[in-house]
Amino acid sequence: MGAARPAVRERRWRPGRPVDIALTLSPLRHGRGDPTWRRTPDGAVWRTSRTPDGPGTLRITAAGGEVHAQAWGPGAEWLLETLPSLLGADDDLTGFAGTLAAAARSGPVAARHAAIVARLAARLPGLRIGRSQRVFESLVPAVLEQKVVGREAWRAWRWLVTRYGEPAPGPAASAGMAVIPPPEVWREIPSWDWHRAGVEAVRARTIVNAARHAGRLEATACAGAASAEADRLLRALPGIGVWTSAEVRQRAHGDADAPSVGDYHLPGIVGWALTGRKTDDAGMLELLEPFRGHRHRVVRVIELSGVRPPARGPRMPARDYRSF
């Protein structure tokens, strides 16, 4: 007899408003070939997660205003239960509309910027800021992405998860998908494998130390703690600054007001979209101030618009730490 097929659990959910699944979940993808995230030709998004109940695989599709989810593994029930939050059910779109209206009344400059943002947002009716509620699995790739170009960070993420993770529950394993290792495994990765992954000692130490405090970090999302408290705990750890904290809170906490200050490209993109001129972090925050409460959302809308300043400056250099 053939091997038994892995058990699958299912849920159908009507969000009551448009949700673009791939767009909403795309921040959880870390480069091409990410072993924890796939989009298949049928439009389904597959992702793996290490839930409080164990590893799980989630497959999500949408049609006719209904979301259909299938899940496998010990974490299947948790993934299905938290599906609405993952897809932005907690996202405050009414508050965003109010913020745009208030900005439009606050002066001619802010009104022009609000009109630009409103126009760009209208092109993305299905965009939501989702909440994964998994802090550590957002923290590791954020640390890997510190001060290196994306392709180097994504290669390191792919190598480490593939080597130290476990096969995804259910049919996703046959496609090479894997689940992020638990914190205790990250603490034991030897120095030579960090080097083989292209991760230098500073980032490796940051991840190892964060793994020691993973329980406290996860509690900030599971308990629905304020993002400000999560920011305080994250930035209390060596090697985690304002940029990394924001990247984590955007994904794990669904924080629509956590702009990524310190990003190499974002200030120029935001400045160009709103004023026709590139700016720095301070200038970006000044431009975003009328949108407080939704500053990350505004940045995300601008990023997805495709508006970019002319590429005249130097590119951020790639540094392959495997050669050091």
Image (tube, rainbow, N blue to C red):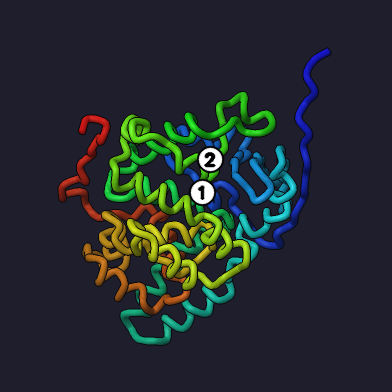
Q: Is residue 125 visible to the viewer in this orientation of the structure? A: no
Nearer to us in this view, 123 or 218: 218
Rendered location of residue 235, percent (x, y): 38, 64
The spot of residue 268 in percent (x, y) is 25, 60
Amino acid type assigned to the residue bearing label 2 in the image: Ile
Decide if residue 282 is on the left or right side of residue 158: left
Secondary structure category for the residue under label 1: helix
Spatial distance from mark 1 to mark 2, Cα to Cα? 7 Å
Residue 180 is marked as 2
Examine the rendering and report whether any part of residue 8 can be seen. Answer: yes
Q: Position of residue 211 (x, y in %)?
A: 47, 50
Image quarter hosting the N terminus: top right
Neighbourhood count class around disc 1 (C-alpha, 10 Å): few under 14, some 14–19, many 20 upward: many
Residue toward you, 196 or 36: 196
Q: Which residue is drawn at the image coordinates 44% and 34% (left, top)? A: 160
Give the residue furthest to the right: 1
Give the residue at x 51% y 54%.
214
For label 2, the crowd category at 10 Å Cα-Cα, with few meaning under 14, some 14 to 19 and many 20 or more, is many
- Most extreme residue toward the left is 313
Picture quarter with the C terminus: top left
**Left or right of residue 264: residue 91:** right
Is disc 1 in contact with disc 2, using a CB cutoff of under 8 Å?
yes
Circle 2: element type = loop
- 131, above or below 33, in the image: below
Q: Residue at x 31, y 68 (%)?
A: 274
- Badge 1 is on which residue? 137
Earlier-in-chain disc, 1 versus 2: 1
147 sits left or right of 254 in the view: left
Mark 1 is on which residue type? Glu
